[in-house]
Amino acid sequence: MLRDSGGAQSLRSSVVLGLHLYSSQHLCWGPTCLIPRPLAPVPESRRPAAACPSSDSCPGGPGLPCSASSCDLPVLLPQGRSTVIARVKSLCSLVIQRVRDVTGIASVQRSHISHSFFCQVAKAVLTSQLKPHQDKPNFIIKTPKGTRDLSPQQMVVREKILDLVVSCFKRHGAKGLDTPAFELKDFDIAGQFDPMIPDAECLKIMCEILSGLQLGDFLIKVNDRRIMDGMFAVCGVPESKFRAVGSSIDKLDKMSWKDVRHEMVAKKGLAPEVADQIGDYVQCHGGVTLVEQMFQDPRLSQNKQALEGLEDLKLLFEYLTLFGISEKISFDLSLARGLDYYTGVIYEAILLQSPAQAGEEPLSVGSVAAGGRYDGLVGMFDPKGHSVPCVGLSIGVERIFSIVEQRMKTLGESVRTTETQVFVATPQKNFLQERLKLIAELWDAGIKAEMLYKNNPKLLTQLHYCENMGIPLVVIIGEQELKEGVIKLRSVASREEVAIKRENLVAEIQKRLSKS
Amino acid sequence: MLRDSGGAQSLRSSVVLGLHLYSSQHLCWGPTCLIPRPLAPVPESRRPAAACPSSDSCPGGPGLPCSASSCDLPVLLPQGRSTVIARVKSLCSLVIQRVRDVTGIASVQRSHISHSFFCQVAKAVLTSQLKPHQDKPNFIIKTPKGTRDLSPQQMVVREKILDLVVSCFKRHGAKGLDTPAFELKDFDIAGQFDPMIPDAECLKIMCEILSGLQLGDFLIKVNDRRIMDGMFAVCGVPESKFRAVGSSIDKLDKMSWKDVRHEMVAKKGLAPEVADQIGDYVQCHGGVTLVEQMFQDPRLSQNKQALEGLEDLKLLFEYLTLFGISEKISFDLSLARGLDYYTGVIYEAILLQSPAQAGEEPLSVGSVAAGGRYDGLVGMFDPKGHSVPCVGLSIGVERIFSIVEQRMKTLGESVRTTETQVFVATPQKNFLQERLKLIAELWDAGIKAEMLYKNNPKLLTQLHYCENMGIPLVVIIGEQELKEGVIKLRSVASREEVAIKRENLVAEIQKRLSKS
């Protein structure tokens, strides 16, 4: 199966595996990593037993039993080679640790253990996670439950998106914080401040991120918990039904008003005339003029809570206009937001057009960012009951990942998984030394450079590699160039070549890269 | 306890919490996050029961029981406010989910639940992780076992170090890969290549990273498994004792030769004359001349394995010289490396001098990076027994984090936890609108900017904030400036102020920032 990801002779086998460092996720380290997965039985011909190396003599080692039984470890290795290597390294360490634990011999090392015994222990390690009724399963070295491997392509997409989000957060004075086990794509402002200033900044941040991501046109719906509650009160909804009715209204982006009304009347037990009054309100959306209009509303303007909310929204829109984003914001009386700790302004960003091509099935993605004010939450847990007003937002990065990935699939776009800028090539034999000297010069200048790990690769092979990997520039060194003290610099796209003085090469490359 | 991290009136309360995105560690999401920790009993006065808000009416909600008992949820909130907010949000969601599960009412929302009932369920959620003998513990909303929260300061240090490592990996054509549950700070090159070319690149990468990190002088010890085994063979060590003796030799960086010799003879049962022969070898270290010398060694040159290793090392040193790093590499016959899957070249980087100040206790850090060739590991698990030669390296980032953090502590260096470049201030009242317009301009130009979330902050408060937060530039707008169409640009360090035309402000700021 390993071969499937690129033969040793093929170009792809020279892929360099750089394993990402972001966050040390060795949290779940341990046997729990190794979860059995029921699979179709492995065909006899593919079982590793047949491949057990005959050269595997058993050195015995310090007191370890040596089983003569053939290796029958049914490990299936999934996915690309890079993942396999990481996992096999881990399993290997686990097995040796297990042997040390069992035998009590701390100095046991891999070479003490025969291949067949090693496989036995590996099987035991894998089996230790087995369910009772599973008798003879096939194993897979698997990621912990609830997690998944990410391919290099997925990592590139994620990295770009997260870079953009993080750089926006930093632009707004954010501090980094790493709290494992929580989903943290949030930006929060905590503290006692003058009204709506931090709230407006949260909306500005959402706009900056969504514009930057170029996901297409978007809109941020805004409402206020107090306006919603006031609206319910003046329409005659009993207070005990506020949230139940709110959750019906939250469905208006997926259901028609008729269906929502039916749910409120038939399931939530609302009087039909009450439902109709709500209907008049929740179908309203607009800009600051709608806020003004609601101030004039004969019933809503009688409700203290609603008035407070409207005052704040009016101020908010003033600030949003100063930030230049008011046309992206819609006051929407149907916005309810599921999370229950919000106490004031709430908001939710939606994409206005499907990013898929015309004729494609439109993507249904719901909201891609949301947030609001939650002034009561932290105080609820404070021993002295002190409140800490908070306002914040969450970016739905997983949703955004899916949208971007699906769009790229639809458009047939490919992702470069490396960032290599320059390839060092030679048309001649016995030029390894010159290539090594040259590439070290480039690395030392901070230029991302690669070459083939062969003594005498063919020029065509080298140029094909650049085309396949999307490397934009090639530097070529041969006998002629060496004699003249120049290097040939080739653009892969245009196939143009120019000779450049050796001492000017780094500067010329940097000039070209800064232009692109 | 929340107050301890900065009062609502203090400047620090305007801290913006940007929670980092790197890797979605919602892997461990769930009740396992909430691990009870035995603590000293909470003083009666600090228990939240006393603080249970009297305003907490119980709206009942759809069929939920309402307990009249007072709230006695003994939740202790640790650390800074940012962490608390993240955790409280999570606990809140968990509690509402639990109420939904228990009652079967999916539409239950926070406002349905009385404060006391909410606290009861929260306690139950926290208690569910309790051990049987723990009767009435005090709880802490805790991170999952084996994990820890990172402070903003720690995050800054980590981010800088990881950035440097990742950018070096990318310079060498690395692809990103995210495999949860493994400690992945590795760079690996897999495939069938001409000898020592990828191996030399691994050493080059280690040098680039360690130079870039400026941890002080370092040295990379190099050896080869085959040379070590050959050395043992010619010295007369029985093959079964190769690894046990190897693990003794590995201690030579912490123990004297005398002690290691004693261990080999007394504990590992080696004949004293065999130990002495090993001693002659393992005390050798040097550059390529030592490799040449070993070729002439009358005994080692008779061993086929050792000769193969020496040939490779000779070639390796040739490439290292071309890379300009040979003076950083030491052929060291005492290097054994603990991990057991290495088959050829092995290496380990050590810091040569303690980064602590003179007079300080020197840091004992051991190796900060290591790796080697492991040609047999992947093939061992391949169903057809195909081998995939690999060479790789690991960067000991956790160790490097500690070294850098300890050094900063020693030197009394502080870390800026935000990257804010410009602060928008005003000396006058009623200038909020102008501040908002100005800061939006800066944000839209990609400049990292902050202002106080107050309508009318005092100028001194604003300038103090900049000094406390290390913000280098202040832009000041007042009536005079507005009239003249200028903005005052102030350097926080020099306190120099210049007036700049409003339309040139962004360009001037970008010019100053690019210089620093």
Image: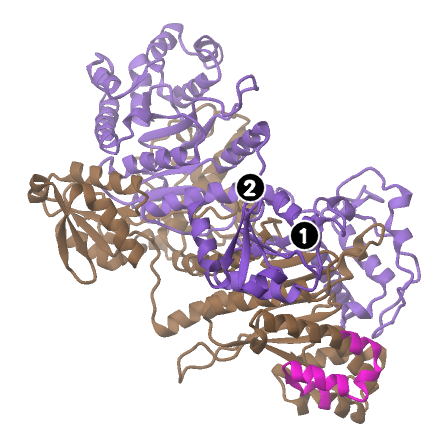
Chain colours: A purple, B brown
| Disc 1: which residue | A459
Q: Is residue A164 at least partly visible in the picture?
A: yes
Q: Position of residue A272 (x, y in %)?
A: 40, 6
Q: Identify which residue, A19 or A47, lies in the foreground.
A: A19
Between A132 and B22, the one lying in front of the other is B22
Q: Main secondary structure of the magenta part?
A: helix
* Amino acid residing under circle 2: Ala
Residue B6 appears left or right of B172: left
Regarding residue B452, the answer to whether it shows in the image is: no
User: Could you tell me if the residues under marks 1 and 2 are in contact, i.e. CB atoms within 8 Å?
Assistant: no
Residue B288 lies in the magenta-colored region? yes
Residue B289 tag number: none
Residue at 21% x, 62% y: name it: B493
Residue B163 drawn at (x, y percent): 47, 56
Q: Is residue B347 magenta?
A: no
Mark 2 residue crowding within 10 angstroms, few (<14) / some (14–19) / many (20+): few
Subunit that carries the residue with mark 1: A
Q: Chain of mark 2?
A: A
Which image quarter: residue B393? Answer: bottom right
Magenta region, residue range? B280-309
In the displayed structure image, the side of residue B461 where residue A96 appears, left or right: right
Task: Let me know if marks 1 and 2 both belong to one chain.
Answer: yes
Toward the viewer: A107 or A204? A204
Residue pictured at 48% horizontal, 34% vertical: B96
Q: Which residue is mark 2?
A: A493
Would you say B220 lies left or right of B297 here?
Answer: left
Q: Position of residue A144 (x, y in %)?
A: 65, 47
